[in-house]
Image (spheres, rainbow, N blue to C red):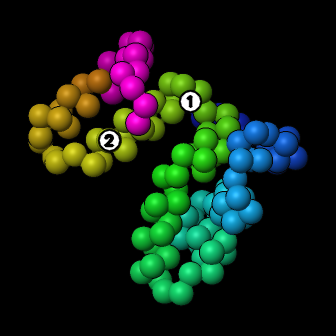
Amino acid sequence: MRATKPMDWAEFSKTREWAQLSVRQQMFVQTYVASGDSVLATTCAYETSSKENTKIFSYSLIKKSAIVNALNRYYNRGPREIFLQELDSDIRETAVGSPARIKLQELKAQVLLGGKLPKKRGAK
């Protein structure tokens, strides 16, 4: 994947993706972008009570579509980068050596070698 340059923060804060976040989600995104640490971002934005709850909550926050959309916009990720990122996540969630994992790894290899992205079959 090619690295893309993040947006200027002043420009990003004027985007539709930023405006669609709640105040706490905005604080989460700001802290996450600055630190790269979803647990720290969760602690700052939501003042959670325990480390375990914070860790669990951070996993759900980083997968929220509004937050994912905002981060994709901030990092200027294109469809190919987004697809590969989602594919990596799917690969991690499948059992090692399973037919599903092998099929996903084959798809990733095809895309990385210049193949076209598959057409979406429906919303996730």
On the image, the x and y values in percent for residue 119 come to: 40, 16
On the image, the x and y values in percent for residue 35 come to: 65, 64
Residue depicted at x 66% and y 60% = 25
Q: Which residues are magenta?
A: 108-124
> 102 left or right of 19?
left
Helix, strand or loop for the magenta stretch, by majority: loop
Residue depicted at x 61% and y 41% = 69
For the question of whether residue 111 can be seen, the reply is no
Task: State which quadrant residue 123 falls in.
Answer: top left
Towards the viewer: 45 or 20 = 20
Residue depicted at x 74% and y 63% = 23
How many other residues sit within 10 Å of disc 1, few (<14), some (14-19) or many (≥20)?
few
Element class at badge 2? helix
Element class at badge 1? loop
Front label number (1 vs 2): 2
Q: Residue 96 — which label?
A: none
Task: State which quadrant residue 42 falls in.
Answer: bottom right
Residue 81 shown in magenta: no
Alpha-carbon distance for marks 1 and 2?
A: 20 Å
For the question of whether residue 36 can be seen, the reply is yes
Task: State which quadrant residue 3 falls in.
Answer: top right
Q: Which residue is mark 1?
A: 2
How many other residues sit within 10 Å of disc 2, few (<14), some (14-19) or many (≥20)?
some
Residue depicted at x 63% and y 81% = 47
In the image, farthest residue toward the bottom: 49
Q: Which residue is mark 2?
A: 90
What type is the residue that disc 1 sits on?
A: Arg
On the image, the x and y values in percent for residue 18 come to: 74, 47
